[in-house]
């Protein structure tokens, strides 16, 4: 029995009873602080851009100097004096003979000349045989601006879609979580100073869909749990939402883990075996972004939704009713609710009128295990859910929409 | 609910896809070659073409802004070839380097300026360059009338109101046949070459004057019309040095001289450097079909007057390029056609008229006349360019016209092959990463979902097979190119594909916990999970579509891959996972904790139920 009640097993059954919505002030505060830090870093620190964005230099070395790997290593030595390094090395061949082309990080004209001479010396060839050139960025400003335009259009479209599919408050909350996710991911990049390459941008765009995927999963459950919530007086909107988060926690965790595992594989191989490059860039941004997506969908999207919902007069009235009813019920049921897990955070929530009984959500945690399977409201599930593992569907389905 | 049928549909899809992989157009070689997707520049290398800016004749480097603008246009053009992950960078202050995956690609056209000009054809002369040719140039047609039919191959037929079909052109199988002797009457228009000329061109002209000799130069300048060399052998001898000039040297000569000196042949004229005749404000000479020299009026309608162009089939199912003009361009075009239709001021020489006695208007692209239809009415609608195009050529020209002309003219250097930037080792590492990632997902799902993990496993294999087949086919059909980033994207998409299973499964758990029989739970869970899965995937598809439509370059390729993977995910979810689950649910072992992990929710529930039932009943 003890094992049955371990956190893992409660998670498995969707009964962890974590009070997530109730502690929303904490999440918002943490998120706000992080966003300020992230934005500050993005503004002041900027990103460290790869040569695809910043442009670079190219050196053309005759193939007579040896293998490409040798040429690259030698060139790197010559470049290190100027703090630059080789980004790509290619063998170029045509009718006019063959040469190695080494693309390096950005150098100014003097540095490039110095490197050219140093290379000639190290390769032991005539400097005239090595040519140096500036290379522009391959990822023009046009690509970035069009990608940003696409991003904005997508956000507009997806908000419309979510507003249509769920409701506009959910759309706003989802969008908010998404934007937070993007800001925080960008912030991490800026702070740590990871190099931004086209792979990073692409990974960043992948997160878009993924973050919303998580949010949709959670909101789907919230919508289900709160449908017709005003018809009875058992739960405030916040509690129902919190229950939904708990019930879909395992789902979110699982989808995130399943999606993160391959990304972890990419990151491991990319960073471990190859040291740098596309795989690492992509793996990194996806890992950071997907982890963020999981957290924001749970900690930010749903709590924000509750805040928005609690401003709705109908929900406000409903919450009051629930509160009143609980007050009227007096001590008897309170023993059930109050005793268990009213956390300090819950207490402080009490001052907020719109959501009067956070204690209840805490209550769900421990004693309310029986409530778990409950669909929209605890009351209904009383008789329906089952002592009977099999064949118990008749009463349940009869009552459910 | 017929699981069998859905599985059959899926099997059918797989069969069709792999038939395409092995036997569709473009498939060739052994079975291994047929299974190869098109790989990107970073993995297998490709072809590189360097374009050197030749800013017309004076040889200065273009401005950085112009070079960047040219780079962007070239990038758009290259990307129009397909989803090919090309790289276009500028190098130094006058080169643009284009790299495309795949060896030995023909990129020679990509650097053409695509300056479109509409010019009235004023006069026509023989451009064969034949020295004393006693007889007028050989002809396949009767020439008595002195009204040469325009060249047979290209003929533009403005659509809209013009009743005309390409009648103006078309009929001549042979070369256009203006006889030199037929045109001496026309009033010369001496103005054209009197424009102020940049110093450097003036100098180059002097250099040419030296080369041909003062006598020849004077003789050429004295010509008021194309000279009849057969009638005047002495003049022919004098003008002979002009036949030795290179295209570059010919280009600096005044247009009148290029036209009037018969020893300057179309071969030389066609060899002029790019943009030699792009100046819309002067008359120019250009050849059509390699024989006929055309003296062309100033350009009154330009490429910038075209708002969009597209390749379409006309009534005769020929590929043509249809042009939409801007509103001001429309007015200019109407004015030009009116002028040509009425032959205002008798500007068009008799030799240059079409067979109905109307002026022709040449469609000039860079140095060449694409076609020169006779104008058979005042045209107020849009226009189209015809000219024996293949589908690909028409599409390419339309693309060039839509993206605009290059502000800089380029000469293509020799194309080169380049090796991969990352290469074999990275490809292997990518595949290894894919393997490890998949393995982790599968281990996790077996751990968490027990034997049901095998459904995940099978569906991942299916997803991968579908995706791979699609990649191979699309690589051939639309040039979809797989880069290392693309491979990583696919790995990720497989993980995300497993997600939809998780959602489904967790739903199932909910339903079982509520005490449903496996079969009804599977159905109910499916109905509910389907909603979630569809909305989540729709969002991803939405993002892919938006990015694909709006963005350019690498991002477009990414968006395509993302959309493809998501659609395939939906296919697998609907046609495989659900039917499989429905079939499994009939088996007895389905609920056993050992087999599925599903039953785990039950014992716990029932024991807790026993304990906690009473208080709850009270409450309720």
Image (cartoon, helix red, strand yellow):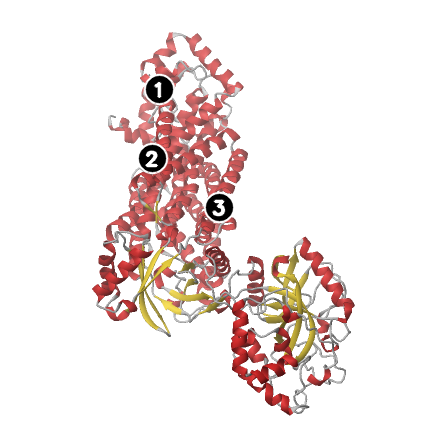
Instruction: Using the image, name the chain to which the residue with label 3 belongs.
Output: B
Q: Mark 2: few, some, or many residues within 10 Å (few <14, many ≥20)?
A: some
Badge 3 or badge 2: first in the primary sequence: 3
Q: Which residue lies at the image location 75% right of the left edge and 65% below the top edge?
A: B339
Query: Please, is residue B130 above or below residue A312 in the view?
Result: below
How many discs appear?
3
Is B498 on the left-hand or right-hand side of B222?
A: left
**Mark number displayed over residue A362:** 1
Instruction: Check disc 3 and report the residue beneath it.
Output: B541
Secondary structure beneath label 2: loop
- Spatial CA distance of label 3 from label 2 is 35 Å
> Is residue B119 something one can see in this rendering?
yes
Choose top left, top right, bottom left or bottom right for residue A253.
Answer: top left
Nearer-the-camera pick, A325 or A100:
A100
Q: Mark 1: few, some, or many residues within 10 Å (few <14, many ≥20)?
A: many
Instruction: Check disc 2 and report the residue beneath it.
Output: B599
- Spatial CA distance of label 3 from label 1 is 39 Å
């Amino acid at each position: 029995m003890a094992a049955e009640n371990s956190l893992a097993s409660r998670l498995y059954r969707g009964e962890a009873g974590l009070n997530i919505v109730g502690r929303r002030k904490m999440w918002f505060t943490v998120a706000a602080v992080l966003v300020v830090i992230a934005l500050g870093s993005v503004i002041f620190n900027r990103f460290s851009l790869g040569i695809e964005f910043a442009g670079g230099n190219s050196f053309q070395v005759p193939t007579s100097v040896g293998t490409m790997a040798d040429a690259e290593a030698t060139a790197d030595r010559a470049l290190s004096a100027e703090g630059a390094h080789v980004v790509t090395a290619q063998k170029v061949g045509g009718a006019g003979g063959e040469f190695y082309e080494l693309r390096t990080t950005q150098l100014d004209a003097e540095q490039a000349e110095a490197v050219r001479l140093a290379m000639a010396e190290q390769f032991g060839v005539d400097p005239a045989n090595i040519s140096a050139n500036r290379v522009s960025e391959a990822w023009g400003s046009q690509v970035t601006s069009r990608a940003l335009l696409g991003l904005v259009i997508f956000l507009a479209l997806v908000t419309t879609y979510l507003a249509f599919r769920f409701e506009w408050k959910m759309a706003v909350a989802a969008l908010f979580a998404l934007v937070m996710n993007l800001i925080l991911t960008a912030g991490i990049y800026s702070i740590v100073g990871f190099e931004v390459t086209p792979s990073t941008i692409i990974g960043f765009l992948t997160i878009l869909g993924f973050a919303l995927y998580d949010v949709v999963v959670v909101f789907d459950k919230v919508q289900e749990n709160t449908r017709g919530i005003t018809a009875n007086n058992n739960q405030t909107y916040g509690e129902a939402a919190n229950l939904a988060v708990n019930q879909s926690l395992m789902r979110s965790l699982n989808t995130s883990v399943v999606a993160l595992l391959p990304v972890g594989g990419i990151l491991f191989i990319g960073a471990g075996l190859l040291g740098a490059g596309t795989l690492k860039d992509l793996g990194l941004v996806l890992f950071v972004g997907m982890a963020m997506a999981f957290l924001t969908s749970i900690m930010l999207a749903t709590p924000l939704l509750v805040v928005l919902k609690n401003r709705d007069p109908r929900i406000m009235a409903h919450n009051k009713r629930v509160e009143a009813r609980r007050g009227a019920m007096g001590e008897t049921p309170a023993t059930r609710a109050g005793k268990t897990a009213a956390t300090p955070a819950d207490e402080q929530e009490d001052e907020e009128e719109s959501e009067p009984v956070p204690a209840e959500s805490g209550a769900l945690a421990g004693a309310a295990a029986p409530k778990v399977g409950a669909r929209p409201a605890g009351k209904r599930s009383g008789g329906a859910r089952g002592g009977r593992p099999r064949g118990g569907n008749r009463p349940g389905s009869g009552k459910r929409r | 609910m017929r699981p069998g049928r859905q599985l059959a549909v899926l099997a059918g899809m797989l069969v069709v896809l792999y038939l395409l992989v092995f036997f569709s157009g473009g498939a060739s070689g052994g079975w291994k070659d047929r299974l190869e997707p098109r790989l990107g520049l970073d993995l297998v290398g490709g072809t590189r073409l360097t374009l050197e800016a030749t800013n017309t004749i004076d040889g200065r480097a273009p401005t950085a802004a112009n070079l960047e603008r040219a780079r962007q246009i070239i990038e758009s053009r290259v990307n129009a070839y397909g989803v090919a992950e090309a790289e276009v960078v500028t190098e130094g202050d006058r080169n643009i380097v284009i790299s495309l995956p795949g060896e030995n690609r023909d990129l020679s056209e990509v650097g053409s300026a695509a300056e479109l000009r509409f010019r009235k054809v004023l006069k026509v002369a023989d451009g064969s360059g034949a020295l004393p040719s006693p007889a007028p140039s050989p002809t396949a047609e009767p020439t008595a009338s002195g009204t040469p039919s325009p060249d047979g191959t290209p003929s533009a037929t403005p659509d809209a109101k013009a009743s005309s079909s390409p009648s103006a052109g078309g009929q001549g199988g042979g070369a256009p046949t203006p006889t030199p002797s037929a045109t001496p009457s026309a009033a010369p228009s001496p103005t054209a070459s009197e424009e102020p000329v940049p110093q450097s061109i003036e100098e180059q002209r002097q250099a040419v004057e030296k080369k041909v000799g003062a006598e020849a130069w004077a003789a050429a300048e004295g010509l008021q019309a194309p000279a009849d060399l057969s009638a005047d052998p002495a003049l022919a001898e004098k003008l002979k040095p002009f036949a030795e000039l290179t295209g570059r040297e010919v280009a600096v000569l005044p247009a009148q001289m290029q036209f009037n000196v018969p020893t300057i042949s179309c071969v030389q004229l066609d060899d002029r450097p790019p943009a030699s005749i792009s100046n819309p404000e002067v008359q120019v000479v250009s050849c059509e079909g390699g024989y006929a020299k055309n003296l062309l009026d100033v350009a009154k309608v330009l490429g910038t007057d075209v708002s969009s162009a597209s390749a379409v089939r006309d009534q005769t199912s020929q590929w043509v390029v249809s042009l939409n003009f801007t509103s001001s361009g429309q007015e200019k075009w109407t004015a030009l056609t009116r002028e040509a239709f009425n032959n205002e001021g008798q500007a068009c020489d008799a030799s240059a008229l079409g067979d109905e006695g109307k002026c022709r208007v040449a469609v000039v692209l860079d140095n060449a006349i694409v076609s020169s239809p006779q104008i058979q009415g005042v045209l107020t609608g849009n226009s189209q360019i015809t000219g024996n195009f293949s589908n690909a050529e028409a599409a390419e020209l339309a693309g060039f016209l839509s993206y605009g002309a290059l502000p800089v003219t380029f000469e293509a250097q020799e194309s080169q092959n380049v090796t991969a930037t990352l290469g074999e080792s990275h490809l292997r590492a990518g595949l290894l990463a894919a393997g490890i990632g998949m393995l982790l997902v599968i281990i996790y799902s077996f751990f968490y979902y027990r034997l049901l993990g095998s459904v995940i496993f099978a569906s991942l294999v299916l997803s991968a097979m579908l995706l791979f087949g699609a990649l191979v086919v699309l690589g051939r059909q639309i040039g979809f190119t797989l880069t290392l980033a693309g491979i990583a994207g696919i790995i990720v998409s497989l993980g995300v594909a497993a997600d939809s299973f998780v959602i489904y499964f967790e739903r199932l758990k909910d339903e079982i916990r509520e005490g449903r029989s496996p079969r009804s739970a599977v159905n109910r869970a499916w109905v509910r999970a389907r909603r979630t899965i569809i909305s989540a995937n729709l969002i991803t598809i939405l993002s892919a579509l938006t990015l694909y439509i709006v963005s350019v370059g690498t991002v477009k390729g990414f968006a395509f891959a993302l959309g493809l993977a998501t659609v395939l995910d939906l296919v697998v979810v609907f046609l495989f996972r659900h039917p499989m689950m429905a079939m499994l649910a009939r088996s007895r072992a389905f609920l056993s904790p050992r087999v599925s992990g599903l039953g785990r929710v039950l014992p716990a529930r029932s024991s807790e139920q026993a304990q906690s039932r009473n208080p709850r009943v009270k409450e309720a």
